[in-house]
Amino acid sequence: MPMKEIRENTLYVDGVSALDLVEDYGTPLYVLSKTAIEERIGELRTSFLDKYPKTRVAYAAKAFMCKAMVQIIEEEGLGLDVVSGGELYTAMAMDFPPERIEFNGNNKSYEELAMAIDYGVGRIIIDGMGELDKIEALCQEKNKKAQVLYRISPGISNIKTHKYMSTGMADSKFGIPLEEGILQGALERAIQSDHVDFYGFHFHVGSQLLDNQSHLEGLGVILDLVEEVYKKFGHRIREINLGGGFGVHYTHQDRPPFAYFLDPLMAMIGKRYDIMGLERPQVVIEPGRSLVAEAGLTLYRVGDIKKIPGIRTYVSVDGGMTDNIRPALYQAEYTGLLANRAQEEEEAPFTIAGKCCESGDILIKDLALPTPKEGDLLAVLSTGAYGYSMASNYNRLPTAPVVLVSRGKSQVMVQGQTYEDLIRNDREVQLK
Ligand code: LLP
């Protein structure tokens, strides 16, 4: 069952007609194809998990998370990378196996760390030295030992993605900087600690990368560190976490296969460990976007159409930056089509505007379409990652529902909010 196909002028997603979906669930609507997610996980299985021993995949929940997504990840046998108490809580609510959870994030709070240690998460990726203090105190108090990695900021320049999606440069809020004065003490502490079991290093260079250079450069830095640790402390680094960041198709560039990133990375690790004469480490990756982005699309109803002669035609839809902040935040580009007139000739470029009171709330500039009419359905493609997960209630727009489609069937993963939901936590106050 293909993710998308066109039958009788209508867009079908994983075997379900877009017309049926909006009739059942309304608009705006996030639609996610289970088959497409499974295919991407399948590709990871053949090109990574089954191909190389001692490998693990922890899906980066921040890309898209809800209870049902946790179910899918659990069923597929993958791990989960969480970055907050809320993400951890969602995993716990589904009894996700704790040993398959990796806890990332800068500035984890004492309470979040306590929650993670109580639940028994598999790895805590330490982002800064204050965090080690908290973990040691908690483990001492609870008489537990945490399995930890250090996230290293590899200090890479020229990361080929939007600056808000770059993380691996020297000037970064993420990770422990590559500073002799800081690292030396940090390593000694972790290796000697009675309260943590120090597994190795983590790095994440950035997101939506279509070129493997930054990953390779980042790993080079990490492998130098592995060697240094071995020489100085006689300590073998048992695990390397390569982060995520594998890019996907939005408009122009195709998504590279996972192997394009992973084969040279695995070769580098193998070679370096062999030269050092050490047993090869466990290798973990944390893909988020690459598992869900292309599996998702958003359906909108076309509303007001405003033609400004000689300038452009604005086609407004019933969602926008509240369900997809990426164009406004990163100038991210998307493409789309009229889901109810999918085989008609494109006639001109149209600008798709969201309904928020912001000039920047433009979803797509100059999208070639058949001339849209009020009531048409617009599908914006590749919205499965960082759409719902970054949604807001700006202008008091309720968040859209998320529907999972699979081989001709659909079911709700997340209910849409009602107006009642919007005021649920509001409290009246005493004014006098
Ligand atoms: N691991 C770590 C430590 C991360 O910080 C991230 C993403 C990932 C894994 C997953 O990266 P992915 O495979 O999804 O590229 N909101 C932005 C993306 C921010 C990503 C932050 N960290 C966007 O919409 O493009």
Image: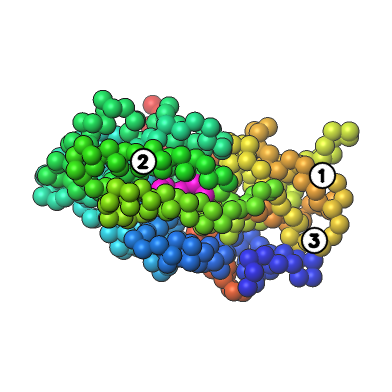
Identify whether 221 is placed above or below 244: above
Instruction: Give yes or no for contact between labels 1 and 3 (Cβ–Cβ under 8 Å).
Output: no
Identify whether 164 is placed above or below 246: above
Q: Nearer the viewer, mark 2 or mark 1?
A: 2
Q: Residue at x 30, y 63 (%)?
A: 97
Rendered location of residue 70, percent (x, y): 41, 61
Instruction: Residue 349: give its label.
Output: 1
Structural crowding at the residue carrying mark 3, measured as other residues with C-alpha within 10 Å and reported as few (<14), some (14–19) or many (≥20): some
- CA distance for labels 1 and 3: 16 Å
Extent of the magenta region: 242-246
Q: Is residue 174 left or right of residue 216?
A: left
Q: Residue at x 43, y 27 (%)?
A: 171
Rendered location of residue 228, percent (x, y): 27, 37
Q: 413 or 348: nearer the eye?
A: 348
Q: Is residue 397 left or right of residue 231?
A: right
Check disc 1 and give the amino acid type: Pro
Q: Residue at x 64, y 69 (%)?
A: 2
Structural crowding at the residue carrying mark 2, measured as other residues with C-alpha within 10 Å and reported as few (<14), some (14–19) or many (≥20): many
Check disc 3 and give the amino acid type: Arg
